[in-house]
Amino acid sequence: MENKDQKNIAPTLIFIFGGSGDLNHRKLTPALFNLFADGFLDANFKIFGIGRTDYSDQDFRSHLLEGIKSFSRRPYEKDGPWDSFQEHLFYLQMDAGTGAKKDFSVIEKKIKETEKEWGMKPNILFYLSVKPQLFPVIAKGIATIQDTHHCSKCRIVIEKPFGHDLESAVELNQLLKELFDEEQIYRIDHFLGKETVQNILAFRFANALFEPIWNNKYIDHVQITAAETVGVEERGEYYETSGALRDMIQNHILQVLCMVAMEAPVSFDANEIRNKKVDVLKAIRIYNKEEIREYAVRGQYNAGWMMGKQVKAYREETNVSPNSNTETFAAVKFMIDNWRWNNVPFYVRSGKFMHEKLTTIIIQFKETPKYSFPSEAAETWRANRLIITIQPENDIRLMFQAKRPGQTMSLNPVEMVFNYNDTFKEPQPEAYETLLLDAICGNSTQFMRNDQVEAAWKVVMPILESWQNRISVDFPNYSPGSWGPEESDAMIAKDGRSWINTSNQRSSKGS
């Protein structure tokens, strides 16, 4: 297979803790399979799934094939790349969560056998697709394996959530720092692997048209929405300890906000990019108790109808307390106290059972003076707007004013659209493909550094603590299929603004 990538990919061993679990079945192995099929993996690679389920190698391969058929972006082909790919898949049955040294000695034995087989030291990737409580135990077990310390070829990938709060995040960071170098630790957030998110940097810094107006002189405000049309489904037990603020805003949305708000890097060096993101997080205003009441809103969904089906209230979901104080919706107005963004609010929101599945970044520009146009032109006047859609579509839309055909000066908002699928015919890689390839190649740009994680927790901790210590008296307070509680609309309306929903975007298109 022709390798289309310019990166020098060394022989690699991948150990997936939680190998028999759902994430590996749906995301990780399908992503690795696509990388292999596209020629991005060296001929010398092995993938070991590690789990408690009793699988033989062949049973494990059959299980993963079902996932590839269901979840890979590449249609399964008989006599296709799977036949070769499966020869690189193996399974180790063990309960790594006990931290037993004998289990990790088995992993060490596999590493040494492979080194002897290949005649060289490979890259080694340890992927922790397990419950967060097991991170410390498994990290300590990995550290017992010879040559994992201070070795750039050995990397440990840790899924979110990274910590439950600031204190636990600091504690986990300190433990990992004792065991590994920071350069070996890859804290993964799959949002940062999405093509449209990665394109934000190119859009901003590779185009002279936009960067000069990317500041408080021209931008009125920014909105970031991550809406889901599903409830908590079978994740009630996890969600009760999480909530929308932890699950979405603390990691996904704040990282996207950083890419929108960061200063221009002097290079695309991993630490340079991450330094700029940390600067943004440190500049976000920390609210006191009274400000939180004004600038942060929470919600919880009620029973109702969603897409023609009757759905339960959050408090009726499996493994959820009937008196739960956990939010399934959160909206926050963030302020970034630096020269570029002074007085520009960043409104963010995320929720379950929302009107539409949607992740967007909206840059709302300030209005231009209308005095030079006749009164009829002002009837449909709209300020310029830039809409970056991450899902369900991958596109960037620029809304501007244009004259309608006719004898009068009548204006309408129209759009210029860049759509990935229309412009680039080759299939887009899934987020996990991009991030796994970066981890294999040792590129940590899109992975969170320890200070990034802690700075993000510092931003949300006052809100979390306020909500935990103050029981909501109006839960549940929004219906499935809505855009969240009325308090969210009221929060932004205080500033003379409103949420820009998909229906609003469609209605503002030119005809």
Image: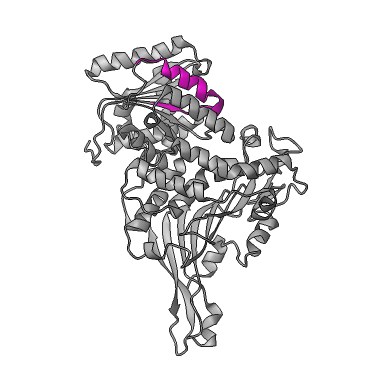
Q: Is residue 347 left or right of residue 9?
A: right
| Image quadrant where residue 85 sits | top left
Which span of residues is magenta-colored? 126-146
Instruction: Determine the residue located farthest toward the bottom in the rendered image.
Output: 407
Instruction: Determine the residue located farthest toward the top in the rendered image.
Output: 102
- Tell whether position 128 is magenta: yes
Residue 326 visible here: no
| Closest to the observer, 264 or 55 | 264
Picture quarter with the N terminus: top left
Q: Is residue 288 left or right of residue 168?
A: right
| Closest to the observer, 496 or 129 | 496
Vertical side of 52 occupied by 70: above or below = below
- Tell whether position 316 is magenta: no
Vertical side of 409 occupied by 477: above or below = above
Residue at 76% x, 37% y: name it. Answer: 322
Q: Is residue 85 left or right of residue 469?
A: left
Percent across and percent down for residue 471 are 75, 42
Vertical side of 480 occupied by 314: above or below = above
Percent across and percent down for residue 196 are 41, 52
Residue at 45% x, 81% y: name it. Answer: 404
| Closest to the observer, 269 or 116 | 269
